[in-house]
Amino acid sequence: MTWEMERFRAENERQRENSARAAFAYAEYNSVGQGPFEFEKRADFGLTFVTEPIVAYGATIDLDALSDMLNVDPGITPPIPLISGMVTEWDQDDKGFWTGAWVAVRVHFPPTDLVDPALQIRCGHHFTFSAVAMKDIPLDQMD
Protein backbone atom coordinates (compact mmCIF):
# COMPACT_ATOMS: atom_id res chain seq x y z
CA MET A 1 0.00 0.00 0.00
CA THR A 2 1.39 3.36 -0.95
CA TRP A 3 1.78 6.19 1.50
CA GLU A 4 -0.99 8.16 -0.25
CA MET A 5 -3.44 5.25 -0.07
CA GLU A 6 -2.62 4.66 3.59
CA ARG A 7 -3.19 8.34 4.36
CA PHE A 8 -6.53 8.24 2.48
CA ARG A 9 -7.60 5.07 4.37
CA ALA A 10 -6.63 6.61 7.75
CA GLU A 11 -8.53 9.85 6.97
CA ASN A 12 -11.59 7.90 5.83
CA GLU A 13 -11.52 5.82 9.05
CA ARG A 14 -11.12 8.97 11.17
CA GLN A 15 -14.13 10.62 9.54
CA ARG A 16 -16.24 7.48 9.99
CA GLU A 17 -15.20 7.24 13.65
CA ASN A 18 -15.98 10.89 14.28
CA SER A 19 -19.37 10.85 12.56
CA ALA A 20 -21.10 8.63 15.15
CA ARG A 21 -20.74 8.12 18.89
CA ALA A 22 -22.54 6.49 21.78
CA ALA A 23 -25.11 9.02 22.96
CA PHE A 24 -27.89 9.44 25.51
CA ALA A 25 -31.24 11.22 25.46
CA TYR A 26 -33.48 11.82 28.45
CA ALA A 27 -37.20 12.39 29.01
CA GLU A 28 -39.14 13.10 32.20
CA TYR A 29 -42.89 12.91 32.84
CA ASN A 30 -45.16 13.14 35.87
CA SER A 31 -48.37 11.32 36.75
CA VAL A 32 -50.95 11.57 39.50
CA GLY A 33 -53.05 8.54 40.39
CA GLN A 34 -52.93 4.84 39.63
CA GLY A 35 -53.30 2.83 36.46
CA PRO A 36 -51.91 3.20 32.96
CA PHE A 37 -50.80 6.58 31.62
CA GLU A 38 -49.89 7.12 27.97
CA PHE A 39 -48.22 10.49 27.57
CA GLU A 40 -49.28 12.55 24.54
CA LYS A 41 -46.07 14.57 24.47
CA ARG A 42 -43.42 12.86 22.34
CA ALA A 43 -39.97 12.33 23.87
CA ASP A 44 -37.79 14.32 21.46
CA PHE A 45 -34.24 12.94 21.54
CA GLY A 46 -32.66 16.12 20.19
CA LEU A 47 -30.31 13.88 18.21
CA THR A 48 -30.50 11.11 15.65
CA PHE A 49 -29.84 7.53 16.73
CA VAL A 50 -28.64 5.24 13.93
CA THR A 51 -29.45 2.06 15.89
CA GLU A 52 -32.59 1.31 17.90
CA PRO A 53 -32.09 2.83 21.36
CA ILE A 54 -31.91 0.80 24.54
CA VAL A 55 -34.40 2.14 27.09
CA ALA A 56 -33.74 2.48 30.81
CA TYR A 57 -36.55 3.58 33.12
CA GLY A 58 -36.85 4.69 36.74
CA ALA A 59 -39.58 6.22 38.86
CA THR A 60 -39.60 8.52 41.88
CA ILE A 61 -42.15 8.93 44.66
CA ASP A 62 -42.16 10.87 47.92
CA LEU A 63 -42.33 8.21 50.66
CA ASP A 64 -43.19 10.77 53.35
CA ALA A 65 -46.15 12.05 51.32
CA LEU A 66 -47.23 8.46 50.61
CA SER A 67 -47.02 7.61 54.33
CA ASP A 68 -49.17 10.65 55.14
CA MET A 69 -51.78 9.67 52.50
CA LEU A 70 -51.94 6.12 53.88
CA ASN A 71 -51.79 7.18 57.56
CA VAL A 72 -48.76 4.94 58.13
CA ASP A 73 -46.82 5.52 61.35
CA PRO A 74 -43.47 7.30 60.98
CA GLY A 75 -40.58 4.84 60.70
CA ILE A 76 -42.72 2.23 58.93
CA THR A 77 -42.27 1.91 55.19
CA PRO A 78 -45.61 2.25 53.39
CA PRO A 79 -46.62 -0.17 50.64
CA ILE A 80 -44.56 0.65 47.56
CA PRO A 81 -46.31 0.76 44.18
CA LEU A 82 -45.15 -1.33 41.24
CA ILE A 83 -44.29 1.08 38.44
CA SER A 84 -43.17 0.25 34.92
CA GLY A 85 -42.38 2.34 31.87
CA MET A 86 -42.28 1.47 28.20
CA VAL A 87 -41.97 2.81 24.68
CA THR A 88 -45.29 2.53 22.85
CA GLU A 89 -44.07 3.83 19.50
CA TRP A 90 -40.80 5.02 17.95
CA ASP A 91 -40.57 8.18 15.88
CA GLN A 92 -38.29 7.61 12.90
CA ASP A 93 -37.21 9.97 10.14
CA ASP A 94 -37.52 9.21 6.43
CA LYS A 95 -34.19 7.32 6.54
CA GLY A 96 -35.40 5.04 9.34
CA PHE A 97 -33.27 6.65 12.06
CA TRP A 98 -34.73 7.10 15.56
CA THR A 99 -35.51 10.72 16.56
CA GLY A 100 -38.05 10.30 19.36
CA ALA A 101 -40.53 8.05 21.11
CA TRP A 102 -43.94 8.00 22.70
CA VAL A 103 -43.97 6.42 26.13
CA ALA A 104 -46.39 5.07 28.70
CA VAL A 105 -46.23 3.97 32.34
CA ARG A 106 -48.29 1.89 34.73
CA VAL A 107 -48.61 2.62 38.45
CA HIS A 108 -50.07 -0.26 40.45
CA PHE A 109 -50.32 -1.18 44.11
CA PRO A 110 -50.53 -4.87 44.97
CA PRO A 111 -53.87 -5.63 46.69
CA THR A 112 -53.78 -4.44 50.30
CA ASP A 113 -56.26 -3.04 52.79
CA LEU A 114 -54.12 0.08 53.27
CA VAL A 115 -54.35 1.43 49.73
CA ASP A 116 -57.52 2.92 48.31
CA PRO A 117 -57.73 2.26 44.54
CA ALA A 118 -58.49 5.97 44.11
CA LEU A 119 -55.28 7.07 45.89
CA GLN A 120 -53.78 10.02 44.02
CA ILE A 121 -50.08 9.24 44.26
CA ARG A 122 -47.64 11.57 42.50
CA CYS A 123 -44.87 9.86 40.52
CA GLY A 124 -41.94 11.10 38.49
CA HIS A 125 -41.00 8.99 35.47
CA HIS A 126 -37.49 9.10 34.01
CA PHE A 127 -36.52 7.55 30.67
CA THR A 128 -32.99 7.25 29.30
CA PHE A 129 -32.42 6.26 25.68
CA SER A 130 -28.95 5.15 24.58
CA ALA A 131 -27.52 4.07 21.24
CA VAL A 132 -25.08 5.14 18.56
CA ALA A 133 -26.03 8.59 17.26
CA MET A 134 -24.88 10.77 14.41
CA LYS A 135 -22.83 13.78 15.37
CA ASP A 136 -24.02 17.13 14.12
CA ILE A 137 -21.19 18.53 12.03
CA PRO A 138 -21.44 22.23 11.14
CA LEU A 139 -21.76 22.72 7.39
CA ASP A 140 -18.78 25.08 7.27
CA GLN A 141 -16.54 22.27 8.56
CA MET A 142 -17.57 19.74 5.92
CA ASP A 143 -15.38 19.24 2.84
Image (cartoon, rainbow, N blue to C red):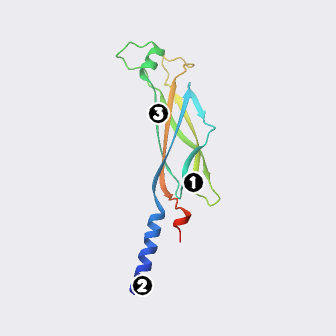
Position of residue 117 relative to residue 55, above or below, is above
Instruction: Give the spatial CA distance, label 1 vs label 3.
Output: 24 Å
Residue 59's disc number: 3
Position of residue 1 relative to residue 69, above or below, is below
Q: Position of residue 27 (x, y in %)?
A: 52, 41
Residue 4's disc number: 2
Q: Position of residue 32 (x, y in %)?
A: 56, 25
N-term-proximal mark, 2 vs 3: 2
Which mark lies nearer to you, 1 or 2?
2
Q: For the residues labelled 2 and 3, say whether their Cβ atoms are less than 8 Å apart.
A: no
Task: Label 2: state its secondary structure.
Answer: helix
N-term-proximal mark, 1 vs 2: 2
Amino acid type at circle 2 is Glu
Residue 82's disc number: none
- Residue that badge 1 annotates: 98
Q: Position of residue 135 (x, y in %)?
A: 50, 59
Amino acid type at circle 1 is Trp
In this picture, residue 36 sits left or right of residue 67: right
Residue shown at 55% from the left, 21% from the top: 120
Question: Which image quarter: residue 5?
Answer: bottom left
Task: Label 1: state its secondary structure.
Answer: strand
Task: Point out the image quarter for the N terminus.
Answer: bottom left
In this picture, residue 37 sits left or right of residue 73: right
Instruction: Give the spatial CA distance, label 2 vs label 3.
Output: 55 Å
Amino acid type at circle 3 is Ala
